Image (cartoon, rainbow, N blue to C red):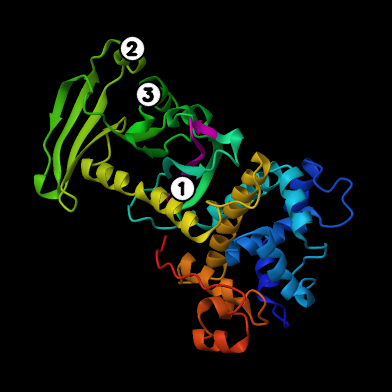
Amino acid sequence: MHEGRIIFSQLMDFIPKYEFDKSVECYQGNRRIRTFSCLDQFLCMAFAQLTNRESLRNIELSLHAMSHKLYHAGIQGNVSRTNLARANENRDWRIYADFARILIRIARKLYAEEDFGVELKNTVYALDSSTIDLCLSLFPWARFRKYKGAIKLHTLMDLRGSIPCFIRITEAKMHDVNILDELLLEPAAFYVMDRGYIDFGRLYTFTQIPAFFIIRAKKNLDYSRRAYHKVDKSTGLRSDQTIILKGYKTSQEYPDPLRRISYYDAEINKRFMFLTNNFTLPALLIALLYKCRWKVELFFKWIKQHLKIKTFYGISENAVKTQIWIAIAVYVLVAIVKKRLNLERSLNEILQTLSLTLFERKPLSQMLAGSYSQKEIDASYGQLDLFEFLTEKDEI
């Protein structure tokens, strides 16, 4: 119920506090802590993500400007750069990783029936990774090349609702294909991947589960054709073949037949070759499923533009992972709020509104639904000098 509470407090009501406390207790996050608990740390970092704060000093100054409202926001500890820096440095990042996974489970249930543009009952996942560049002199633990530092964010996304359901942060040197060893494959689900994940020994594991994969083929694929199926070339399809691998190593790693589909995309004037172990779906549907893979690319683009995961408040590995996992938790939390409040607005629009109104005393549902005009928001509270307005227009 609203009852004059600030927006930030109403937003944090969607956090399952019991589950958060369990994650903290699991790693003894509040052990010997008298002030500035793990919840205080999470709330401050969530505030920084929602308002795009640039530094710890910026977070401190912004929150001190609202010091008379911090108690109502749930922040009871002493907010300072030192406390934030120490918390990010020393408190186990797995607290926030486990909590983000709890939010992900909640969000996936809410979006289980979401339409993603293809009529298919099976669960469809998109797998990809994104590299986050780091300054090697500041982050020596993240060495990538001789003069470059970086980490890699591996993500498996459920295309229904664009919810990341598996996330792994690794050194940038780790090859994408190795992440296949860590996936818990779901029978009858589809996994859509780019050709960087081609390893026929690992892909054969999908067939044995059985789960289905759709992956781009490399140009130098050595194969022989076993069967040919007619296609409607007006749809962009060029061929639909049943093949067997001929290479000495690949034929041993994947002895079963594969399906090879050629598709021409007239919009970008490019031809694609797909490999899949599914022989029942129409060839055009296979091509459309691969096209949906770009949702995971949009996810990476969205969080890099609208959340703080390219610049960091700390330089240790623990601080970097803590910030990334809290950013993911904030992303999923906004998705949960969007669904539970039945909002038609995009995540970008919701974040823009939240960035300006976190300390307003108005009903969250009405504010996010657009019941208040932007003119009313700007006039109701002198917050524009303190919080920047996010101007990006990209929608996920």
- Disc 2: which residue: 252
List x then y, in percent, for residue 15.
68, 60
For the residue labelled by badge 1, is the local secondary structure a helix, a strand or a loop? strand
Mark 3 and mark 1 in contact? Answer it, CB < 8 Å: no
Residue kind at label 2, given as amino acid type:
Gln
Task: Tell me if 258 is positioned left or right of 116 in this view.
Answer: left
Residue kind at label 1, given as amino acid type:
Asp
Tell me: residue 137, above or below residue 257: below
Separation (CA) of disc 1 from disc 2: 32 Å
- Disc 1: which residue: 158
Nearest the camera: 323 or 197?
323
Residue kind at label 3, given as amino acid type:
Asp
Q: Residue at x 33, y 56 (%)?
A: 117
- Disc 3: which residue: 199
Separation (CA) of disc 3 from disc 2: 12 Å
Q: Nearer the viewer, mark 3 or mark 1?
A: 3
Mark 3 and mark 2 in contact? Answer it, CB < 8 Å: no
Mark 1 burial class by Cα count in 10 Å: few <14, some 14-19, many 20+: many
Quadrant of res 61: bottom right
Q: Residue at x 16, y 22 (%)?
A: 225
From which residue to which does the magenta span run? 143-159
Tell me: residue 36, above or below residue 204: below
